[in-house]
Image: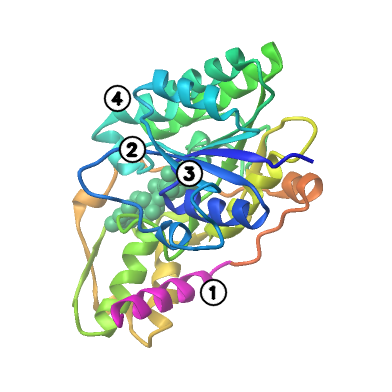
Amino acid sequence: MSTPVAFITGITGQDGSYLTELLLQKGYVVHGLVRRASMFNRSRIDHLRADATVGAERLVLHYGDLNDLTSVRRLLRKILPTEIYHLAGQSHVGLSFEIPEVTCGENGMAVLGLLEIIRDLGHPVRFYHAASSEIFGRPAQAPQDEQTPFNPVNPYGAAKAFATQLCRIYRDSYGVYACSGIAYNHESPRRGENFVTRKISRAAARIKRGEQRELALGNLDARRDWGYAPEYAEAMWRVLQRDQPDDFIVATGETHSIEDFLSAAFGSVELDWRKHVTFESRFVRPAEAWNLSGNPAKAKKLLGWEPATRLPRLAELMVRADLASLSD
Ligand code: G4F
């Protein structure tokens, strides 16, 4: 069997880095798209680039941008990957209210552009689209499954809903192998510092070490279905290993409030979060999604995928990693 070749957009992000580790372990050659910036932002994959057992020919980075799909088309024609994982794009929901055009361009129109490239490629390739629970916004039913109607409440969710529907359309109309993994929140020590879980784990560690006193947050009543990111990277890979393309909910099925996460994180270092958390209105969004909890039954049945890590363990492992990085 020939060596599988993956192309990952968003390779330097949390999910991209875990997926790259997984695919390299499985013997893939991995090509990653990297956006040029004046500062390097590759810390999540530096350990892989430094790993002599991986080698420059098995992990190849290319400069490119979702706003320049002609260059992406050229790259894909040259690389001819067997699998494309599209993980890149503005991923902060709150920020999507501030920069809606960038958000919709990167999370919506870029997917359309990639589907068009794949349609013309003349080479069999499987496409994974990183969809989100935000497509459901304020759903009428909980938990949600693959049939739940879309009802996004922010520009990010609207762009993801548009892209998810386009994957279905290209699959049904042109036979493109395109799948959406409808992932609920997934966290890890590699999570960006402006997402609520990492903000909390970092603050708990810093407060414990005497480096911070307070943590300013927005809406504490919000509830989320939080899983562990490396397990979600495994689900992404499994989605593309089936003969027929399809969409899958990737979730734990359990929801918790921000207060629950605070209790677990601060409690793991014997701190009382109520003594440290303050409210800041700028972190409250113009509209909040609610009722988001995913039913992963289809992924369990057809992919053999099941989440293992949940709260409070998830919060504890994040705090422990932040404490360790503070003592480095
Ligand atoms: O951590 P968050 O910013 O994640 P959010 O908005 O749920 O989005 C994440 O998960 C989605 C999957 O369901 C992804 F599609 C998306 O790309 C991203 O990865 O916020 C979680 C909740 C929200 O309800 C927010 O209002 O936490 C609340 N929150 C309260 N205080 C805060 C804060 N969120 C942030 N980021 N910062 C706060 O200070």
Category of crowding for the residue at label 2, using alpha-carbon neighbours closer than 10 angstroms: few (below 14), some (14–19), many (at least 20): some
Q: Nearer the viewer, mark 2 or mark 1?
A: 2
In three-dimensional space, the C-alpha distance between marks 4 and 1, rounded to whole angstroms, equals: 37 Å
Earlier residue among tags 4 and 1? 4
Relative placement, left or right, of 38 versus 66 is left
- The chosen color scheme is rainbow
Stretch in magenta:
310-328
Question: Which mark is in front, 4 or 2?
Answer: 2
* x, y percent for residue 212: 19, 76
The residue where tag 3 is placed is 60
Screen quadrant of the C terminus: bottom left
Disc 2 from disc 3: Cα separation? 14 Å
Mark 3 residue type: Val
Q: CA distance from mark 4 to mark 3?
A: 30 Å
**Would you say residue 248 sits in the magenta stretch?**
no
Residue type at mark 4 is: Glu
Q: Between marks 3 and 1, how big is the CA–CA gap?
A: 34 Å
Residue at the disc numbered 2: 35
Q: Earlier in the sequence, mark 4 or mark 3?
A: 3
- What amino acid is at disc 1? Arg
Residue 324 on the magenta span:
yes
Question: Which quarter of the picture shows residue 241?
Answer: top right
Q: Are marks 2 and 1 in contact (CB under 8 Å)?
A: no
Identify residue for label 4.
101
Of marks 2 and 3, which one's residue comes earlier in the chain?
2
CA distance for labels 2 and 1:
34 Å
Q: Earlier in the sequence, mark 3 or mark 1?
A: 3
